[in-house]
Image (cartoon, grey):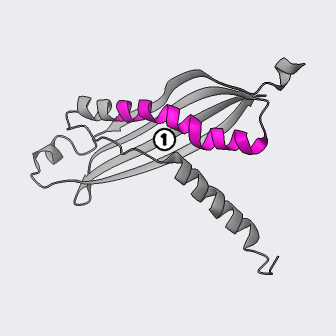
Amino acid sequence: MSDQATPQFQIQRVYLKDLSLEQPNSPGILLEQEQPSVDIQLGVDATVVTEGIYEVSVTATVQTKIKDKTVFLVEAKQAGIFEIRNLAEEQVGQLLGIACPQIVYPYLRGNVADVIQRGGFPPVHLAEINFQAMYEQQQAQAAAAASAPTGLPQ
């Protein structure tokens, strides 16, 4: 009985779920001397696979442009499967929103830098991310959205 109540958190697997590199304006754009602009977008998603098993994925989209022409576009999704059992719902949410992305993200960073370099460009290194701050901000936005429609003091 006590084994069933013991909290569990285990990494089952970390894997590259999706990766693409596009260079739609090559080779002409490669002759440009102008410094490209870089836009980086990140996202985190968690889904239930089965009871106590979750997939957490971190996605990155890196697009570089010179003027209005794309130099390269990288889209990558790194994922992990995690076993989480016998924890309060709030603790599960924190693990899925903070701890799991922190585990998956370094793999994503390495894969993005590697594919960009293999594409013939200097690697773009994604910055470190404070997933706790990101999670807390998302929770605050969700709470504000939930209370906003009424407009009445509570």
Residue 93 vs residue 15: left or right? Answer: right
Residue 86 vs residue 44: left or right? Answer: right
Residue 110, image x, y percentages: 36, 31
| Residue 50 in the image: above or below residue 42 | above
Residue 12, image x, y percentages: 61, 20
Report if residue 131 lies within the magenta region: no
Residue 48, image x, y percentages: 72, 34
Residue 96, image x, y percentages: 64, 39
145 or 132: which is nearer to us? 132
| Residue 95 in the image: above or below residue 131 | above
38 or 70: which is nearer to us? 38
Residue type (three-letter) at the residue carrying disc 1: Thr
Q: Quadrant of the N terminus?
A: top right
- Label 1 sits on a secondary structure element that is strand
Q: Residue furthest right?
A: 1
- In the rendered structure, which segment of residues is drawn in magenta? 88-112
Residue at (28, 41) in percent of width and height: 124
Residue at (9, 52) in percent of width and height: 33
Q: Residue furthest bottom?
A: 152
Residue at (61, 43) in percent of width and height: 97
Residue 117 vs residue 81: left or right? Answer: left
Magenta stretch, main secondary structure class = helix
Residue at (43, 36) in percent of width and height: 76
Q: Quadrant of residue 27?
A: top left
**Residue topped by disc 1:** 59
